Every structure is written in C-alpha cells, then in structure tokens.
Image (cartoon, rainbow, N blue to C red):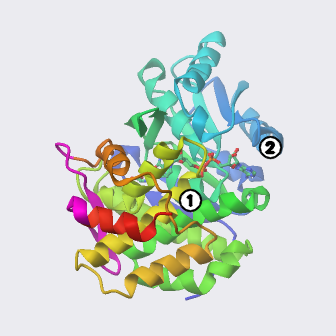
C-alpha cells in the first residue's frame, strides 16, 4: 500500500441523472479543463468567506469568466456559528439583488460550512439551481462536498435544517490544503480515519502507517487519502443517497460528536475534533456491547490522538448528553441510535442502555 501522485484523479458519484465527477489533484483551480462543461448560464455566483476569498477567489473567478458573462461573489462571515439563516439569507439577498435567474450556477468556495450552506441555497433558490463544490479544507474534500447533504444549524441541533441536493461537480485542488491551519488539517483527518473502521480495514492500516506524512502534508499521502475517502463515500452514497439505511454508517462518532459541538456552542470545538473524540466514545461503546475485541479501543484512540485530535470529551453530564443526542437525526421515537463497529470495515446501527452510555462517558469525560 503506497501513496499516489497528486496529478488528476477522478472519482465518479453514480446516481443516474444526478451523477457527477469529483476531480482531485494539485493545480485544479488553475486548470481550465476542471471548469469545462459546467451547466450553461449567463451568470455564476461564488459563495465564499472572508478567510478563503483573499486566497482563492480571484483564481476561481477568472476560470468562471471563461464560461459566464457575469460572475458575482458573496462573502459570508467565517465560522460554524454563522452556519445559520442570516448567512443563508445573505446568499438569497445577493441572488435577488442581482436578478439572478433559475439557471444561475452557485459555486461554493471554501470548507464544509460554505459548502453546506451554498448547497442548501442552491436547493431552495427558485426551487433549485445548479451548484458546484470547490472544497478547500481536507474535511470538505474527503466528506462534506460529496454526496449532496446540505444544511444549516439550529441552536437546538446540528444540521437540522437542510436538503439532499447533489452538486454538478466537485473540484478538489490539493494545493489549497497548503494554507490550511494545522488544527483544521487534523479536523479533516477525523473524517478520513472514520472510513477505515466503517468500510475498509486495510485503509485504517494505511492511515496508521501514513498519519505522520498526512500531518506533514505530503501531497502523495493526501492525494491517496482524499481519493480513497471519496471512493468509499461514493460507494455508500451510490447505494443509499437519502440515508434510508447504509448511509448512516458515515456518521460513526457523530452522535457523541454532534452532542459535543452543540453542547459546547458551535465553533468552540471544530466539527472534526468533535467527531474524532466521538469516535473514541463510539469505539468504546462497540467494545462494551461485545461487538469488538477490547484492543479496538486503544487502537482507535491512538490513531485519533496521533492525528492531533482530542480524545477526552467535555464533561456535560449524562442527562445533557442524552438530551442532546435525542435531537440527533438518527434518533427514532426518542431512542438514541449509534453507529457502532461490528467488525473492522463493517458498521451498523445500535441502541444502548443509559447505563452503558454513562459508563462510556465516565471513562472518557474530564
Ligand atoms: P469550515 O468550513 O469552517 O472551514 C474550516 C476553517 O478553515 C474556516 O475558518 C475556513 O474559513 C478555513 N479555510 C477553508 N479553506 C481554507 C484554506 N484552504 N486555507 C486556509 N483556511 C481555510 O470547516 P470544515 O471542517 O471544512 O467543515 C465543517 C462543516 O462541514 C461542519 O458544519 C459540518 O457539519 C459539515 N459537514 C458536512 C458534511 C456533509 O456531508 N454535508 C459532512 C461532514 C461535515
Ligand atoms: N457525512 C455524512 C454523510 O454524508 O452522510
């Protein structure tokens, strides 16, 4: 198992008429081929934020000007705490102020927050306009830009308002990861690690062997990690686009993780940090339920820690955790449902007694 080179690789999301390509590689932002064949329209609107725009907006705009007579931009405030109605309305305000028609192409330039909000705006504006994902964080390249989940947060629950709406294309330029803060790179690694235990035991072994190279931003290692992650996500989404069953496995670590994010207030812990720590708790629950051998927990904790992620959860108290986890989208009739590992490379949905959840929290909260 080796790394791969960082020239273009393409992963296909196969969803009949909603199929599309994920283009992964160095230099994609500046490669005219990456931007060819997008839907025809007179205008495009780039949605980005105040951090990403100074770095990449002009390159993106120049490419789009080769295809659209008008290219506008709207810059939102940066942060998970702004993944809300106000930011969404800013997109709609711009679209309406510029008299954008129903063919206008939205382009999400940024991380998962921008991608999720732009996708939701595209799903809703005039009942649906095309959109393109240009993910610039590791997390968005391996997960959020792919598969069509779009959303904003509600103060009472993470990603509670949204739509399934697929992009026309994903353009993942690995060079954008050069400017990513270290903490954000680690957050992205959480979602990379996730794919191992849920779907590919060999990939987990590969990640363990390459975690230092990934943190050092070795392009070959990053290229392989993004490609393999997208392949696994494509395999899952291709079978269950709207999360009727299988797709829920992509939420390994997210039930505890979303509770941490919402409980601490959006933006305190990064999404990837909460997911990383959530995977430690969910791994422990998998062991305590007798699904996995005891050595699975230290193995997961070690790789998550080596990725630079927190492995100790905040002490919110059992009742608060339960209250937060009951708002999770996977909960059914008030029963909290966890994605647990059943064998390396295989996950499933499980309930858990309060006493078991309490034991897990006691073991990992401080
Ligand atoms: P983010 O969008 O907040 O980006 C992280 C930070 O990095 C931000 O400050 C951003 O401005 C900055 N940034 C982005 N690209 C940069 C670059 N190239 N150089 C320097 N700085 C850069 O966070 P994220 O981790 O990308 O995404 C998290 C969000 O994704 C959460 O809201 C989560 O719910 C969502 N998510 C969605 C899905 C999905 O399937 N739709 C999956 C996973 C996560
Ligand atoms: N990130 C979870 C999903 O796309 O289903």
Mark 2 = which residue? 59
Mark nearer the viewer, 2 or 1: 1
- Let me know if residue 263 appears in the view: yes
**Residue 249 horizontal/vertical position (percent):** 33, 62
Q: How many labels does the image show?
A: 2
Closest to the observer: 239 or 39? 239
Look at the numbered discs 2 and 1 and tell me whether their residues touch, using CB distance below 8 Å.
no
**Which residue is depicted at the point 30% across and 68% down?**
340
**Which residue is depicted at the point 37% across and 50% down?**
321
**Which residue is depicted at the point 62% across and 79% down?**
211
Dot 2, crowdedness within 10 Å: few (<14), some or many (≥20)?
few
Mark 1 = which residue? 273
Q: In this rendering, would 119 be left or right of 210?
A: left
On whether residue 171 falls in the magenta region, the answer is no
Q: In this rendering, would 305 be left or right of 178?
A: left
Quarter of the N terminus within the rendering: bottom right
């Amino acid at each position: 198992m080796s790394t791969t080179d960082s020239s273009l690789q393409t992963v296909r999301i196969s969803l009949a008429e909603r199929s599309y390509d994920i283009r992964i590689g160095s230099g994609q932002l500046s490669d005219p081929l990456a931007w060819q064949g997008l839907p025809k329209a007179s205008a495009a609107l780039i949605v980005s934020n105040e951090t990403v725009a100074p770095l990449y907006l002009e390159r993106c705009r120049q490419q789009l000007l080769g295809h659209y007579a008008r290219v506008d931009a709207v810059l939102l405030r940066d942060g998970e705490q702004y993944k809300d109605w106000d930011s969404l309305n800013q997109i709609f305000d711009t679209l309406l102020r510029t008299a954008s028609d129903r063919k206008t192409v939205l382009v999400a330039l940024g991380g998962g927050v921008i991608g999720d909000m732009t996708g939701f705006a595209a799903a809703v504006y005039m009942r649906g306009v095309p959109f393109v994902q240009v993910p610039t964080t590791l997390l968005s390249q391996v997960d959020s830009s792919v598969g069509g989940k779009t959303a904003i947060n509600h103060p009472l629950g993470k990603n509670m308002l949204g739509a399934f709406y697929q992009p026309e294309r994903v353009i993942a330029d690995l060079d954008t990861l050069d400017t990513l803060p270290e903490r954000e790179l680690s957050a992205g690694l959480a979602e990379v690690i996730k794919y191992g235990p849920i779907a590919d035991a060999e990939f987990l072994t590969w990640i363990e062997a390459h975690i230092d190279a990934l943190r050092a931003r070795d392009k070959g290692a990053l290229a392989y990690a993004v490609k393999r992650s997208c392949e696994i996500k494509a395999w899952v989404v291709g079978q269950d686009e709207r999360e009727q069953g299988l797709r829920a496995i992509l939420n390994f670590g997210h039930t505890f993780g979303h509770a941490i994010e919402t409980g601490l207030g959006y933006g305190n812990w990064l999404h990837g940090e909460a997911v990383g720590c959530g995977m430690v708790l969910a791994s422990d629950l998998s062991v305590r339920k007798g699904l996995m051998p005891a050595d699975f927990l230290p193995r997961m904790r070690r790789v998550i820690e080596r990725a630079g992620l927190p492995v100790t959860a905040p002490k919110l108290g059992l009742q608060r955790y339960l209250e937060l986890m009951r708002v999770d989208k996977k909960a059914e009739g008030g029963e909290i449902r966890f994605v647990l590992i059943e064998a390396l490379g295989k996950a499933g949905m499980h309930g858990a007694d309060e006493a078991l959840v309490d034991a897990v929290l006691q073991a990992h909260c401080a």
